[in-house]
Amino acid sequence: MRSDELCFCGSGLTYGECHQAVTQRLWAMKAKGAIVPRPALIKNKKQIEGIREACRINSLVLDKVAENIRVGMTTQDIDDIVDSYTRELGGIPAPLNYEGFPKSVCTSVNEQICHGIPSDKVVLREGDIVNVDCTTIVNGYYGDASRMFTFGKLSPAAEKLVRVTKEAVELAISHLEPWCHLGDIGYYISRHARENGFSVVREIGGHGCGLAMHEDPYVCHIGALHKGMILPPGMVFTIEPMLCEGTSRFVVNKRDGWQVSTADGKLSAQVEHMVLITETGVEVLSK
Ligand code: MF3
Ligand code: CO
Ligand code: CO
């Protein structure tokens, strides 16, 4: 594409003013054997503003859950809070009807790894650890993040699992910089988990996000330093490791086809942040 043509991304700017510099640098790296993203995965200014706003609203929904969640509540109560507050803020809960998912949020309790379906039969108890994973659509843009909530006194193992999972995400984020590699994320997360005696789910992971809930690339939480796709400024994706107390092998509920639990029934924890690679570092959109 010529510098004076309108950019392919729809920004209204010329290619020269928009995606040209980053695309040319990626092509040069690709010629030397690097794995590089498609230029369309690199968000323009307008898209970043929209995604930032969707993440802001999504965080407000998670804050609302944090204010209200308590022992004795059901996971359906969490769904009610998320659905109504998301709409009150002008957003749409993305999980509802996504590939047939029946609820507005994922609530994964104890041995559930992810995609837990809210239910009026699941009551939150003292000692439980629960992941609440919200995804919100605002003006067509997506924000996706999840937090762990715990109740009362936890077992030492549960306490440590939740702490190490949060640390693993923070550690990976602290190493992000423009033009680093996707494998760096999985390297730091899996190393921190392993050093603390926990396993990491390999087959379910993070993802590009912003214009759709799930975009390329797949973000594996097991990886090797300086390997995998290059992450230039403008890349937006989630980091959402699932750490397990025992085996990382899992089973998918046969009746609903969604809920993923550890094969050994031991605990699993997850924390999800959505990040933007910037010219100088990283912006945590889901803060
Ligand atoms: N929020 C989840 C993620 O982090 C996706 C949920 S899809 C659903 O990728 F259908 F289960 F809601
Ligand atoms: Co999510
Ligand atoms: Co996600």
Image (cartoon, rainbow, N blue to C red):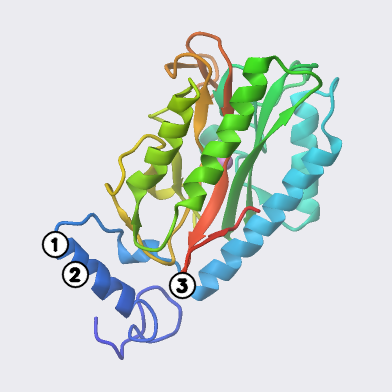
Q: Residues within 10 Å of mark 2 (few under 14, many from 20)?
A: few
Q: Secondary structure at mark 3?
A: loop
Residue 32's tag is 1
Q: CA distance from mark 1 to mark 2?
A: 7 Å
Q: Amino acid at mark 2?
A: Ala
Residue 28's tag is 2
Q: Residues within 10 Å of mark 3 (few under 14, many from 20)?
A: some
Above or below for 165 versus 275: above
Q: Residues within 10 Å of mark 1 (few under 14, many from 20)?
A: few
Q: CA distance from mark 2 to mark 3?
A: 21 Å
Q: For mark 3, what is the residue?
A: 44
**Circles 1 and 3 in contact, beta carbons < 8 Å:** no
Q: Image point 62% across, 53% down: which residue?
A: 286
Place of residue 107 in the rendered image (x, y in percent of width and height, measured from the top left): 66, 29
Q: Amino acid at mark 1?
A: Lys
Instruction: Give left or right: position of 251 versus 256.
Output: left
Label 2 lies in ligand 3 vicinity (Cβ under 8 Å): no
Q: CA distance from mark 1 to mark 3?
A: 26 Å
* Residue 213 in sight in this render: no
Q: Earlier in the sequence, mark 1 or mark 3?
A: 1
